[in-house]
Image: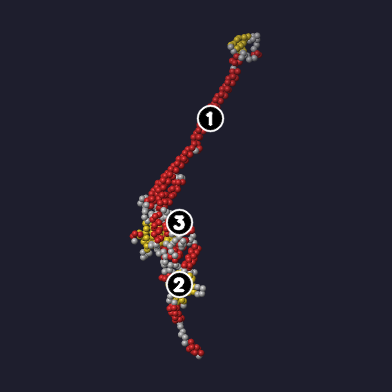
Amino acid sequence: MGTKKHLTLKESPPNFEHSMKRLEEIVEKLESGSVSLDNAMELYEEGVKISKQCLEKLTQAELKLKKLSKDVNGNLELFKENEE
Amino acid sequence: MFRYIASAIMITQKTFTVSELTRRIKGVLETSFTNVSVEGEISNFKRHSSGHLYFTLKDEGAQISAVMWRGRASNLFFTPQDGMKVVASGKITVYEPQGKYQIDVVQLQPRGIGELQLAFERLKQKLADEGLFDTDHKKALPEYPERIGIVTSPTGAAIQDILNILSRRFPAVEVLLYPVKVQGEGAAKEIAEAIKDFNKLGNIDVMIIGRGGGSLEDLWAFNEEVVVRAIYDSKIPIVSAIGHEIDFTIADFVADLRAPTPSAAAELVVRHQSEIIEYLRNFCYNTEQDIRNIITSQKDRISSLVQSYSFNRPIDLLRQYSQEVDELNRQLHQSAMHSFTFNRQELNSLQKRISSVNPASVLERGYTIVYKGSEVADRAKKLHSEDSIEIKFHDGKLPAKVE
């Protein structure tokens, strides 16, 4: 599941792991001081955007629990805990 | 003649056909041993593709063939192994076409916990030798999983512990529960299926397989080859959380990570979200500082460049050239002056020389010029007596006569 750097609003939110890794990358680059001022501003903006997205995701306060079962044909079905 | 007598004597005993005799034997054996328990060591064990099990039970003195039909075999919580000492119960049957007798096993048990332990060691060694426990094969767990698959009993304590810990630490995940039997007949098969099905589903980031504590027999399903191989083949990283801290099943050795308990597994699989929230909130603060640092270092860079030798070189050169120009000017001036002085000196001496040869100055020194008519008499020979001459002094002429 790869993610592109610039997402349009219509696309699904990027993979959390990829976002966190990209954020760590940005922090490293900025800390090293080896980027030009232009790049630094770009990276900073991207980082702010990503960290906001990640924070939003973390506000989900409840676990999503789903149960799997197999029907007679051996096909897997998924349903939420409370649907049982 | 004798032949007829001999036959007549033998005819007092009934002569059976092979089939008749065998049927008789079958009758005797099968009624005498309708339910018998026998203890022996398994050898030549084979599981047929049909699902029927064929093996031999032996001891030092004898051996007996055994068969366990598929239906009965599926009740086993363990897979029989060669070398295992077992207690088999069932009935004796005779297979007429081959003239063989065998025990038709209804129940099979390891001969005591020691047997299970030995079987565990044997299987563990065999799979270790195959390389199933190699650390190179183990996969790293994802740092931020979003979907977690759990293979466990839906009613046990394990799932509750896991869900509690996950809720507290990182509720922003999706948990998929695949309910299975975790002990007894058919458990191993279900567990292996669950692992394979999660792999088919594909978008699971990490899997936990676990159960609560129990005896070696209770945990046995996690020692079965089918489960161990399913864990090995899984593309999704698997954390094993079986029993208590001291329990080790073969699944624990082959898993990508072993947790001592189901709760510990939940802790290993997700970070506490407060760590992450803090990191994210600090991002803005920290990177602002980083950017300030970048600006400062750029400023320093500029300033040191401006002060550097190379940067100032053009000005230096300019000054240097200025100085050279001045110097050249001076030299030029000096040379000019020098020339001028020199020429003047020359002029002076020339003038003196000219003066010295200027007839007027000669006259001034007292010399005279004698003219005879219009000619200059520059020697006495040119004059005769009675000649009229003119003597030019510097201050005038005087006529005279030569005596």
Marks 1 and 2, how far apart in space? 121 Å
Q: Chain of mark 2?
A: B
Determine the CA span between mark 2 and mark 3. Answer: 44 Å
**Residue B293 visible in the shown view:** yes
For disc 3, the chain is B
Q: Quadrant of the C terminus of chain B?
A: top right
Residue B50 percent location from the top left of the image: 43, 70
Q: Nearer the viewer, mark 1 or mark 2?
A: 2
Expressed as whole percent of the image width and height from the top left, the position of residue B402 reads: 64, 10
- Residue type beneath disc 3: Ala
**CB atoms of marks 1 and 3 within 8 Å:** no
Give neighbour class at mark 1: few <14, some 14-19, many 20+ (Cα, 10 Å). few
Front residue of this view, candidates B341 and B204: B204
Q: Does A54 appear above or below B370?
A: below
Front label number (1 vs 3) = 3
- Labels 1 and 2 in the same subunit: yes
Which residue occupies 66% across, 13% down? B381
Residue A57: image location, x then y, percent: 38, 52
How far, Cα to Cα, is label 1 from label 3? 78 Å
Confirm whether residue B238 shows in the render.
no
Label 2 CA crowd tier, 10 Å (few <14, some 14–19, many 20+):
many
Q: Check disc 2 and report the residue beneath it.
A: B88
Letter of the chain that mark 1 sits on in the rendering: B
Label 3 sits on residue: B140
Asked where in the image residue B153 lies, by quadrant, the reply is: bottom left
Instruction: Identify residue for label 1.
Output: B327
Residue B364 image point, x, y percent? 60, 14
Disc 3 on helix, strand or loop?
loop
Q: Earlier in the sequence, mark 1 or mark 3?
A: 3
Instruction: Residue at 43% x, 72% y: name it.
Output: B106
Residue at 64 percent of width and 14 percent of height? B379
